[in-house]
Image: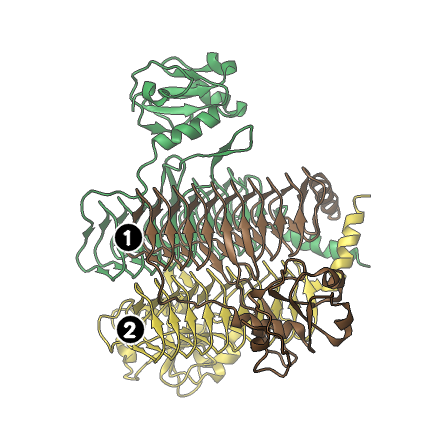
Chain colours: A yellow, B green, C brown
Amino acid sequence: MKLSSIFEHTNISCESDLEISGLNTLIDSSKNELTFLQNKKYLKDLKETKAGAVLVNEEFKNDVPDGCIAIVCDEPYIELAHISKLFAPEIIETSGDEAIVGDGSKVMPNVYLGFNSKIGKNCNIMAGAFIGDNVTIGDNTTIYPNVTVYRDCNIGNDCIIHAGTVIGSDGFGFANTKDGKYIKIYQNGNVEIGNDVEIGANCTIDRAVFKSTIIKDGARLDNLVHIGHNCIIGNGSILVSQVGLSGSTVLNEYVVMGGQSGTAGHLEIAPFTTIAARGGVTKNISEPKKSWAGFPLMDHREWLKLQGRVAKLLK
Amino acid sequence: MKLSSIFEHTNISCESDLEISGLNTLIDSSKNELTFLQNKKYLKDLKETKAGAVLVNEEFKNDVPDGCIAIVCDEPYIELAHISKLFAPEIIETSGDEAIVGDGSKVMPNVYLGFNSKIGKNCNIMAGAFIGDNVTIGDNTTIYPNVTVYRDCNIGNDCIIHAGTVIGSDGFGFANTKDGKYIKIYQNGNVEIGNDVEIGANCTIDRAVFKSTIIKDGARLDNLVHIGHNCIIGNGSILVSQVGLSGSTVLNEYVVMGGQSGTAGHLEIAPFTTIAARGGVTKNISEPKKSWAGFPLMDHREWLKLQGRVAKLLK
Amino acid sequence: MKLSSIFEHTNISCESDLEISGLNTLIDSSKNELTFLQNKKYLKDLKETKAGAVLVNEEFKNDVPDGCIAIVCDEPYIELAHISKLFAPEIIETSGDEAIVGDGSKVMPNVYLGFNSKIGKNCNIMAGAFIGDNVTIGDNTTIYPNVTVYRDCNIGNDCIIHAGTVIGSDGFGFANTKDGKYIKIYQNGNVEIGNDVEIGANCTIDRAVFKSTIIKDGARLDNLVHIGHNCIIGNGSILVSQVGLSGSTVLNEYVVMGGQSGTAGHLEIAPFTTIAARGGVTKNISEPKKSWAGFPLMDHREWLKLQGRVAKLLK
């Protein structure tokens, strides 16, 4: 879509014919992408962006690097939300290539296979499963009944997705207007699941707003786990039931999160970290191989000691 | 149903021919409804009830207002539970008008549209969705795959319901008998969802025992959120993932509840209240625009300070 | 399967022709079952096992009782995991007897009824439900839309299973190799649900690794409840929404667990125990009829008092 067309029916004037393929963050944008500055703390990223164009307040116009078109507006995040709709694909495609199913795969009745979807060899796709448009599933993977895989998501080889799990639902994103409306930020990214991943029943894995929510090889998720948009789950990580990860949480390899634990968003957890059941992570954890507990989070042994001290208040 | 018929096969004698259309609370009942006094603290409501008849203990017989028939019994709540079954509609209707689907709406394969259901214009009803009998859905609404909407529930315009979500399941209600049985209180109410509401994946919104569980315009629910029966979610409220609201919780407009927070039942939260992640609300919040945290709940800044003080116990 | 065949393609040599029907624990195994010693603390059970054969480390070879064949290996738990796959039934059966549906039962469209499954009389099996192979459902039971019942599970009479609930998904079990791989322990047990049980929407009830996860008569589960593998839920127990039970938790009769409460695994809770909302149980509770709260768990009244004392730290 031409940059000028994006703003055609708005009160922002833009004459550029630059072809825009989508939206992205300041850091990840390439020259055919449009980005935005929402928060002053990302000013450094603005100065280094490779984006073709950027939505900015007047105030930061001069920080836009050469070769990047500044689109000056009052509310960049609101504009972004409106524009995200222009890049949203159809919810239900009505044409495309018929699904390809590999040798040895069993597809039960009442399964929906979307256009351009590909199922590998020796898979089980069980009744009631929904495989959206452009979804790719590898070999030897089992999709249990009533699983929903939204369009454009990919699942690797040797995976097991238990019943009722939802992969690729929209991340929780919207821009608040001054008069109390929420403008949906269309989640035009996807979910990428590696090989040898097992996901329990009734989990929810949200698709990314841009790019991908990623679950890497060998991860194990128990039941009723929530993964927010743009999370990255490292190789061999273990998430026990009812864990909830807010958006953009990064778990490095072999992180273990106990039952009902959770994280705030936009943080990173070092490899081989263990979070005890009910632990609530609100900051980055940079030292690997440690055990943590509590909310607020602390060293697991300290937490145990603290509970003893707290109990003494009764005496 | 005639009042006399309701008690026909019981050891309660009642000769009245009053036509009873259903059950309701003391406060909300009208003259063709039957109500009950379960708890002395509602005695004031009994005295003001507009109900046609009321189940009461002998003790409170004389508090029943003129024009309301007192049905005296030992265990009003148990009787109510038994009677609720008489007013429960069929789980699966076997006849009725065929569903009406508005112009521009796409209904995918493997969708079930119940009798007398109405889908507005330009909707997407995706594979595996169950739209129960007498359900109405407005215009421009998307129902993702494997969503279940129980009978008699209504959804407005411009809504998005993500995959696996259940709308209208029975509220958690039963009367305990002295010998340890639970008599189901049939949940004969419904769920009413306004316009411009987005509900995430694998949420559960229980139907009301009487009247409606209500989600008002502009509300946003993340994934795996539980809404108990008879809750009211105010306009523009935001419920982050894994929030749980017990029955009859009332959120006023623009309440924000952080991830994994929850409420006890039968309480009301003032407009523009923010509950931090994991906060547990057990009392009414009457002052608007405040932030709260913790369990037990306290002012958010106090909670932060308190955590610092608690941590000092380690020294 | 002959014991010798089990080890045919491994570097463990075993010549016995003993017929092995499956795997089981030290305590529960019978003479045609294979068991394992994973942890020294079960040494007493090893000495009393009735199993036909046992996987043990060299160190414990001499503790294996007469009549039980010792299979000596370096990593019994890893071997167990590999062997569990040999006993896993087909995920999708391709032949068997057609389902039997009792008189008066309604089976809606888009329902899948597996081979050898039996539905009793006067049941409602609603659209999108998946009833796996060899599943038995009693009389007067309602299965709401998009419920998944995995193969080999059984549900009694007069039960209600709300929409989206998953019964019989795999328990969360795997053996960790030294090089960071997780070998799945196939969950070859099932779920047994008694009579008069109501289970809310989008719950997950995992099947047992051996034998059965059991939900006894009269139990009531709210929405989004997680039951780990091999749990036993006693008669008349009540689990409020978002409760999570780790594997092998035993609730005796009439246990009440408040919303968002949880348990660690392998523990037992006495009859008529009440756990307040958010309570976290990490040890056995042996005294019946008490109320508990908090995490760590304590007497409910003590917990209330402690919260008062903690709050005083602010002064």
Q: Chain of mark 1?
A: B
Residue A236 seen by the camera: no
- Judging by the rendered image, the residue that carries numbered circle 1 is B157
Q: Quadrant of the C terminus of chain A?
A: top right
Q: Is residue C274 above or below residue A248?
A: above
Q: Is residue C136 above or below residue A66?
A: above
Asked if the residues shown at circle 1 and circle 2 are in contact, with their CB atoms under 8 angstroms apart, the answer is: no
Outermost residue, bottom side: A67
Q: Is residue C289 above or below residue A203?
A: above
**How many C-alpha atoms fall within 10 Å of the one at disc 1: few (<14), some, or many (≥20)?**
many
- Judging by the rendered image, the residue that carries numbered circle 2 is A7
Mark 2 lies on a secondary structure that is: loop
Type of amino acid under label 2: Phe
Residue A165 seen by the camera: yes
Q: Residue A272: give x, y in percent of width and height.
A: 65, 74
| Residue drawn 50% across the image and 59% down it | A224
Q: Nearer the viewer, mark 1 or mark 2?
A: 1
Count of labels in the image: 2
Along the horizontal axis of the image, is C228 left or right of B199?
right
